[in-house]
Image (tube, helix red, strand yellow):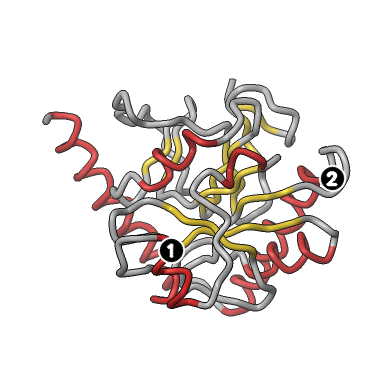
């Protein structure tokens, strides 16, 4: 219970910080952030062997922008899959379409993936679609130097990451200044990530994955 309370307080503070960061950004700064993220992630994807499946997500307005990233991954020949959150907070996956932005259509109220697929007119790829991904990009409010990620609290990605190949790198997108300078509480079900990419294009790796100029050790 102590961990739950600590996470709740940290999440509240992280959400407030994100709202403040997002509100202070001009359209030009948001566009620059999108370019920096796309450049950084495309550089990482380029280190992998040939066109690969990349799991990403369609960003909400206050999140680091992913629209350009998805467009450029698709243009480079990669397959991009993005999640839809089901009512039970599990993640179903579909192929990304360039130009699509996140809204309430990314959250399905139905209890079954089959029903959700019919409603949305999408081809679902299964909850285990991450098993064939060569790179996973996740949302998150903050990440610490050990790779502990603080999400929105639903546990969606902690469960979804259980389907990925253990050798597949997982990176979280953060606004510059959102990385945690202190160790975050980590419960048994929490799945750490391998690092983060900031809106300035900085890549920080936790486990030495050869992705960028900085390394958290």
Tell me which corner region of the image, top left, top right, bottom left or bottom right, holds residue 209: top right
Residue pushed farthest right? 50
Name the residue located 70 percent from the left edge and 40 percent from the top edge.
134
Is 179 situated above or below 200?
Answer: above
**Residue matched to label 2:** 46
The mark closer to the camera, 1 or 2, is 1
Q: Residue 158, image x and y in percent?
A: 40, 38
Tell me which corner region of the image, top left, top right, bottom left or bottom right, holds residue 104: bottom left
Instruction: Left or right? Give the position of 97 relative to 9.
Output: right
* Label 1, residues with CA under 10 Å away: few <14, some 14-19, many ≥20: some
Name the residue located 44 percent from the left edge and 49 percent from the top edge.
140
Task: Tell me the element at label 1.
Answer: helix
Instruction: Left or right? Give the position of 141 relative to 172.
Output: left
CA distance separating discs 1 and 2: 34 Å
Query: Nearest the camera: 192 or 64?
Result: 192
**Residue matched to label 1:** 114
Task: Tell me the element at label 2.
Answer: loop
Cβ atoms under marks 1 and 2 closer than 8 Å:
no
Q: Residue 159, image x and y in percent?
A: 40, 39
- Quarter containing the N terminus: top left
């Amino acid at each position: 219970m102590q961990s739950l309370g600590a996470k709740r307080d940290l999440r509240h503070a992280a959400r407030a910080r994100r709202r403040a960061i997002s509100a202070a950004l001009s359209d030009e700064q948001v566009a620059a952030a999108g370019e920096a993220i796309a450049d950084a992630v495309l550089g990482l994807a380029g280190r992998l062997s040939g066109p690969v499946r990349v799991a990403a997500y369609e960003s909400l307005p206050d999140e680091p922008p992913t629209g350009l990233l998805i467009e450029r991954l698709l243009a480079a020949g990669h397959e991009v899959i993005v999640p839809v959150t089901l009512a039970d907070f599990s993640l179903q996956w579909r192929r990304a379409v360039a130009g699509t932005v996140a809204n309430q259509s990314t959250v399905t109220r139905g209890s079954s993936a089959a029903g959700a697929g019919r409603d949305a007119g999408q081809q679902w790829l299964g909850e285990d679609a991450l098993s064939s991904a060569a790179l996973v990009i996740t949302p998150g409010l903050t990440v610490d130097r050990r790779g502990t990620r603080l999400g929105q609290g639903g546990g969606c990605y902690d469960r979804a990451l259980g389907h990925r190949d253990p050798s597949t790198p997982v990176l979280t997108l953060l606004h510059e200044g959102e990385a945690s300078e202190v160790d975050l509480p980590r419960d048994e079900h929490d799945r750490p990530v391998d690092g983060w990419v900031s809106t300035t294009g900085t890549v920080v790796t936790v486990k030495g994955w050869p992705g960028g100029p900085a390394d958290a050790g």
